[in-house]
Amino acid sequence: MNFELTISPINEIDASLELILVVEKNFKHDFVQNKKLLKKSGFKAGQDETCLLIESNRLYVGIESINDENLRTAMAKAIQALSSTKYKTLKIATYMESKKSYHNIRAMIEGTLLGEYYFDNYKTKKSKQALKDIIFSLEEYSAIDVNMEKAANAIELGQITADATNFTRDIVNTTPEDCYPKTLADIAEGLAEESELTCNILKVKELRAEKMETLLAVSRASRHKPRVIHLTHKPENAKVVVSLIGKGLTYDSGGLSLKPSASMVSMKLDKSGGAAVLGIMKAIAEMNLPIEVHGFVGAVENMIGGDAYKPDDVLVAKNGKTIEVRNTDAEGRLVLADVLGYAQQEVNADYMFDFATLTGASVVAVGHYTSSVMGNSDVPKDLLIQAAKDSGELVTKLDFNKHLRKCLKSNVADISNISNTPYGGAITAGMFLDEFIDKENKDKWAHIDIAGPAYVEHSWGENPIGGSGAGVRMMLRLLETLSKEK
């Protein structure tokens, strides 16, 4: 998709289709040219409602008010409404809250590209989007000294962000037969070859040397050997150092604590945290932000077999803590325990964030569309909440509760890998991870449980069925904010 900015009046732009947003159901606006036809069609201009008038080559979309969230979903629905048409070029006025609201342009670009996404790798008949060019008219703002450089930068950031999100979606949606730990490592190495990123891959021999025994235990029954990925973006004179850690379970059968068959159907989603880290690192390299960012992914497959780790096993994590295994389906936290330890060993970060489809309890607590954020300090959690608001993602805090910590007590080891109560599972999982955060890093770290929004089996907002790329847009906004701090 190509985007163009112009200060030419909308009626002077040559395009096969015009897109008009009807704001606050205002049919009296000058842009609305087909009032009788719209009335006849029953178009009410509710948020994201569309009406394509082929006879006039105009597409109308309702929007409650002009803000980033509404613009993002309106543009997504607009592009989806055109998916089966043959229009090749589209023109649209630039809808901004004020003459300096260039972030609105970014939201429109993101909505377009996120809404355009489809995953048809396994279909014999491929989807095709005829639309290739979108022209934005800034005529309304040209008289008030519009900054074309800032507008163009908003388009570029929108493209990078949406492309990284769609890149992540592709990884999440790829089947476990085609995406296993080595595949994720190959993707990471490909990113490094294409950019200024550096990449280090740890294989079994190196993992044993690093004493990452809990991760190795989870991987034991799989024919696919585990990998730990470390991607680095390290510009000169970096203002801040950030570590991102992702759970990369390329498939999770539950191990010997086998999942019900219905629960296994979508378990390719369990690599969403690791996929998000790869997508973020791709975008960071393209944005070339002046901050140092490290991306770590624990890439593992959890299967069954004669060599599978078992309930009742006691494992020793990289930091020396012993863990009683009471359920082999609580494997993501075991992988993260070691990867968090390795990340802290390798990097002295100012902030640490981990991404994981860690618990169904998070979905029960906050629903399909929202990520749960946990940690010891409000500083990193508040950064995430603001970044989520800016990016269009949804997050909420789940506070640690000292009374729940005792639910992880083990009689035979330092800690159990599951709680002894069925309640508060998202929080107890986060508190389990906290046991593997060094004392000096406690207030630098936040855990993001993306189990709800990472993979949903119906479309919502600007997100399609399947992988959503949860965490990518939010973290990019946060990193952009940190890069601007003095």
Image: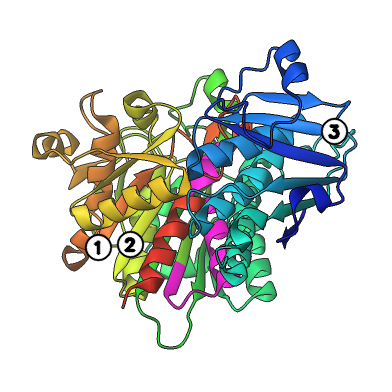
Within 10 Å of disc 3 (Cα), the crowding (few <14, some 14-19, many 20+) is some
Q: Which amino acid does label 2 sit on?
A: Met
Disc 1 from disc 2: Cα separation? 6 Å
- The scheme the figure's colours follow is rainbow
Residue 226: quarter of image:
bottom right
Q: Is residue 429 above or below residue 143?
A: above
Q: Residue 195 at x, y = what percent?
A: 64, 75
Mark nearer the N terminus (1 vs 3): 3
* Residue ID for mark 3: 57
Within 10 Å of disc 2 (Cα), the crowding (few <14, some 14-19, many 20+) is many
Is there a contact, CB below 8 Å, between mark 1 and mark 2?
yes
* Residue ID for mark 2: 352
Q: In this view, does 310 lie above or below 228?
A: above
Queried whether the magenta region covers residue 345, the answer comes back as: no
Q: Is residue 355 above or below residue 75?
A: below
What secondary structure is marked by label 1?
Answer: helix
Relative placement, left or right, of 249 versus 326 is right
Dominant secondary-structure state across the stretch colored magenta: helix
Q: Residue 358 at x, y = what percent?
A: 39, 39
Look at the image and give the residue range highlighted in magenta.
Answer: 268-294
Q: What residue type is labelled 3?
A: Asn
Relative placement, left or right, of 32 versus 259 is right
* Residue drawn at 83 percent across, 40 percent down: 17
Q: Residue 395 carries which label?
A: none
What secondary structure is marked by label 2?
Answer: strand
> Looking at the image, can residue 117 be seen?
no
Mark nearer the N terminus (1 vs 2): 2
